[in-house]
Image: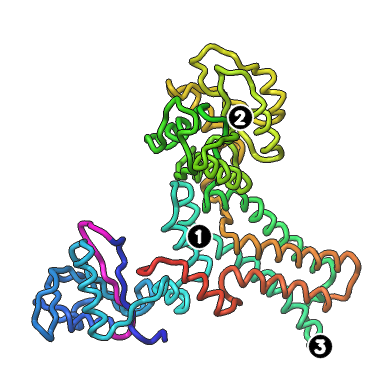
Amino acid sequence: MQSDTIAAISTALGEGAIGIVRLSGEEAIAIADKMYKGKEVLAEVASHSIVYGHIIDRTTEELIEEAMVSVMRAPRTFTREDVVEINCHGGLLSVNRVLQLALKNGARLAEPGEFTKRAFLNGRIDLSQAEGVMDLIRAKTDQAMNVALKQVEGKLSTKVQTLRQALLETVAHVEVNIDYPEYDAETMTHALLREKAEFVKTEIDKLLRTAAQGKILREGLSTVIIGRPNVGKSSLLNSLVHENKAIVTDIPGTTRDVIEEYVNVRGVPLRLVDTAGIRETEDIVERIGVERSRQVLKEADLILLVLNYGEELSAEDKALFEAVAGMNVIVIVNKTDLPQKINLEEVRQLAEREKLVTTSLLHDEGVDQLEQAIAELFFGGGIESGDMTYVSNSRHIALLEQAKATITDALDGIEADVPIDIVQIDITRTWELLGEIIGESVQESLIDQLFSQFCLGK
């Protein structure tokens, strides 16, 4: 029930300078008062103030913690309920003891995302803003964080609300014409209806044009490094990560499993996967790694195909080109510090339209050109900022695609001179689909599913 008071640890578990236990609900301040001992009574302190004292188990008078306690009264809080935050020492045992005492005194352990869910249910934020909170927590680059922050601030919500209002006015106008013809209202014609529908469709198209880039910023590019053994795949991962994550030797088959790491390349988050060298092998462990490499290859958004400058192209190299045909590929010819044996013209013919970069990872040469090639492939060399509204959430993208289809149906109906009251059905459905983005018309089961993905204290 939403009327009860919830509590959870709101900081990351583990050792740290400060740990925070958060309470929210009608009894938050009363429950905190049962635990708090200081010069003040929490029920009497001013809202949005912080006081110093100790957390005490009243049943045993045992000292639990030294703490700074923040008191924030509804409705000027994140959840629009009374909120208390107990700031204590950041050890795992410390914050857990404070949480257990809060539960003992009448609070209930919060479900994952329940604080943000209450903010949504109490009207402080809409559903798209709530999802932006989750994206903000998970952001792995500055650009991804900026996109999420704009969503939290309501940039997408405002755009969607504008479109819904335009559609609502149109539907209302049609209803007036149909139900109250005696009123002196402007008659809704096909021309007026087309104007409104085209405006909404144009704006939806603008949002969808950002979808591919927005989704990349939110989820990252699944990027797989492939190549024959000992061409420098692990060296490439280490160069992009700027850390020795993978073992590098001259012995083929050193990498026997899939290694994953997130990296930031010119603002583009890459979920970088270093694979075992794809080759035929009798080693059973390496063979398992090769099979895993083939699997992740199928799921990749970007392939970094590494070749050896100091060796001629082999049948295995050519087979890799065939395996990645039709995918987003950047060909990297590594080890330019060695005498050239590879035929670069042949490589260019095999690569066709794919970008070709030469590197000497041993001497850290060519990495900047590779990073630029990745940015150009997906973002034309850069990421727009400023007032750009990126749509990054898969749920939002799917709903916008459906809304585009229904508003297109409405336009087709207008062109076919279908009666306005029939066209209105598609207009109304578009309005409903846009409402699902911000949570105006959405099933409770979906709301529960979305908030269950949050961390416990958020």
Q: Give the residue at x 43% y 31%.
A: 239
- Element carrying mark 2: strand
Q: In which quarter of the image is the C terminus?
A: bottom left
Three-letter amino acid code at the position of disc 2:
Val
1 or 2: tag closer to the N-terminus: 1
162 displayed left or right of 451: right
Mark 1 or 2, closer to the camera: 2
For residue 314, say whether it is visible: yes
Q: Which residue lies furthest to the right in this view?
A: 416
1 or 3: tag closer to the N-terminus: 1
Measured from the top left, where is residue 174 in percent x and y?
78, 78
Measured from the top left, where is residue 287 in percent x and y?
55, 41
Whether residue 16 is in magenta: the answer is yes
Three-letter amino acid code at the position of disc 1:
Gln
Residue under numbered circle 2: 331
Query: Which quarter of the picture shows residue 250?
Result: top left
- Element carrying mark 3: loop
Residue under numbered circle 1: 151
Three-letter amino acid code at the position of disc 3:
Glu
Q: Are marks 1 and 3 in contact (CB under 8 Å)?
A: no
Q: Give the residue at x 41% y 84%.
A: 2
Query: Which quarter of the picture shows residue 305?
Result: top right
Query: In the depicted view, which residue is nearer to us: 185 or 124?
Result: 124
